[in-house]
Image: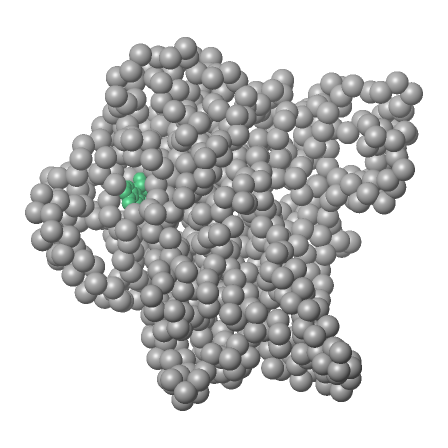
Amino acid sequence: MEPAGLEPAEMEPAREAEEPPGSPALPAEAPQGGPPAAALSGEGALPGRERERERGRRGAGAPGSAGRAARGRARRAPGRRSGTESARRPGVTVDSSKAKTSLEALKISLRQLRWKEFPFGRRLPCDIYWHGVSFHDSNIFSGQVNKFPETHAIVTMARQWHNYCIRFKSQKMFSFIDSSDQSAFPAGMTETVRKITLSRAMRTMRDLFPLEYNFYPRSWILPEELPLFVAEVRTMKDSNPSWKPTFIVKPDGGCQGDGIYLIKDPSDIRLTGSIQSRPAVVQEYICKPLLVDKLKFDIRLYVLLKSLEPLEIYIAKDGLSRFCTEPYQEPTLKNLHQVFMHLTNYSLNIHSGNFIHSASANTGSKRTFSSILCRLSSRGADVKKLWSDIISLVIKTIIALTPELKVYYQSDIPAGKPGPTCFQILGFDILLMKDLKPVLLEVNANPSMRIEHEQELSPGVFENVPSPVDEKVKVAVIRDTLRLVDPQKKKRKDTQCQSPEQAPGASEEPPDAAPSPEAALPSLCLKQVFPKYARHFSYLRLVDRVAALFIRFLGVKGTTKLGPTGFRTFIRNCKLSNSNFSMAAVDILYIDITRRWNSMGIDHKESGSPGMCLQAFVEAFFCLAQKKYKALPLHKQVLSLLELCECRLAALHGKRLVWGCGLAQPRGALRAAGTAPGPGPARPHGPQVLRLQKSSHQLRALMCRDRTGS
Ligand code: ADP
């Protein structure tokens, strides 16, 4: 089912001042009244941007002219005090000491918001901690962090990869890798969005909902699925002899096009030793991408995962389009190796003599996405439908990723333990096919937020020069992310909720407060898409519910793997074992699946701990569902088993509540059994909680009636 009407009108492209030269490779259609009216209000809305950029580059201490300009522009309500009051308003405090390459964009954002920056950290807690890469800082107990936490193993892996990049760079093997850019190696919520993990998550969702998850190219994981890859390609070729596919091989955990190559036949895979130590994903290559000016390009869209529980997703109205630097031709044996023709990576193409740096948003090798939409729209393309498809792709992808993220999150910041709340900006790389269908290429946990690029002044002499296109898009994303997580706004809202007697329409501000800098800012560039469109997508969240069961039975906080006892307890409490499925069979299922998953992929080996990871549990759950509900399609099998398990656990929980009243069963015993209500993010989301509570209440009432004999 494809939800209709997802496209908020505000997501149409802005009218561009000048039309770029050339024309996109769209079916030639007469322009239909030009692009839709401007709705994007980006950086252009702030006058004095150039001056601000200049000052921004001068470093942390430079006074922000945008801040001053904003103060000057902000209209003051009559009777309000000015100047000194503004200084007295307790500003939001932001620790930027770990912002790394996002620092410049962050500084500009903070000046626009008039928030207080602590560039060297602060002894007292800050409201917000801005990290350039991953977050694994056990010293942060409060506030908000712009990254979801990592396990130690992942951070170590990221460091190893970083060192690997530096080593090869020093050997001039991958000279394009910018090791100073921390986004050049995997970190952040790395695990969840690494190529292999993403491919697995998408495969699981595609197994459940084949039509809904057809926006991700068919993929196989190497080396473990090499025989499957070979067999499937052979079958497809046999059934359609005219099919002449191309495949793209991408090393896991790679970035910036590193190690990527194209092949025409499975036998061309380079089965060197490195594929064992560094697995890869092989993927169907999209041979007919949409071209603009005869060039292949991809889109980098910024997505804010504002909260995991409840799920809150925002999409930026503008993104970047990164262009190849050689005219595109469909892949042939002759051009397969031409990276400037086939790979859109900025970090690769910048080394091409054809790369065009442009200060304009709609020309050059890096443009705004809105400028592309504008061109498409002027040629009659259905831009609203395109946005709707992109929103759908983003929500579905995040639904595929959240189960694993929740497992990591509960292990790092268990409920009850003091810790910050987290949000994260993700970079979605999307390719448009000729028919405008968006295809997901990858999700970046740490999209580069640099707003300048290196320019070679003379051989070997480089200088950082500002990139207006990057600045336009990225500053808006960072600033508006901060506006959305503004802790003071939340406090103001809470206070308002507590004083309902306040007259409707009364000012949000206390009478003596200085005017908010919000008044001078453009409208938010980030648009909420979830829960806004939740009703269209909630039915897809089955694996999320399986993950909730998994977390519930993990037992000891801080782990991400389920032990054999936890698995047995799950089976027992959900009453899944019977004469056809003995506890011995349960143990065999556990051992079989766990052993296989632990022998696959470097991620599980690296974490070093034995036990069943989430994906293995999901596989076991699907197995059980297939066994129990043979005749149904997979998603119905899984849904039926989920409902059965949730219902039985609720009943058990209800029983224990009643026993707890009468027999005072120790709470610790319940928790050990994995059924205690106890704290933790393991609780299922909204409607389920209600359902569970309702059924436990009903059960309690029934049992009380039993006891009293009524
Ligand atoms: P990396 O993380 O190394 O950048 P990507 O998955 O983003 O790896 O792939 C690099 C580039 O290769 C993309 O920017 C895109 O231009 C191209 N590419 C990747 N996958 C495909 C695909 N399935 N079909 C066509 N082009 C692809």
In the displayed structure image, the side of residue 154 where residue 485 appears, left or right = right
**Residue occupying image coordinates x 51% and y 59%:** 544
- Tally of marks: 0
Residue 7 location in percent, x, y?
A: 49, 31
Q: Does residue 541 sit above or below 505 in this rendering?
A: below
Residue 616 location in percent, x, y?
A: 41, 70
Q: In the picture, which quadrant includes the N terminus?
A: top left
Question: Which corner quadrant of the image does residue 484 belong to?
Answer: top right
Residue 337 location in percent, x, y?
A: 18, 42
**Residue occupying image coordinates x 44% and y 48%:** 397
Residue 544 or residue 697, whichever sits in front: 697
Can you see residue 243? yes
Question: Which corner quadrant of the image does residue 296 belong to?
Answer: top left
Question: Which corner quadrant of the image does residue 685 belong to?
Answer: bottom right
Q: In the picture, which quadrant includes the C terminus?
A: bottom right
In the displayed structure image, the side of residue 273 where residue 623 appears, left or right = right
**Residue occupying image coordinates x 83% and y 40%:** 496
Q: Which residue lies most toward the front here?
A: 710
Residue 143 location in percent, x, y?
A: 71, 52
Residue 655 or residue 362, whichever sits in front: 655
Can you see residue 454? no
Residue 367 or residue 554, whichever sits in front: 554
Q: How is the image coloured?
A: one colour
Figure quarter occupied by ligand 1: top left
**Residue occupying image coordinates x 61% and y 39%:** 481
Q: Does residue 697 sit above or below 48 in this rendering?
A: below
Q: Does residue 629 sit above or below 13 in this rendering?
A: below
In the displayed structure image, the side of residue 445 where residue 689 appears, left or right = right
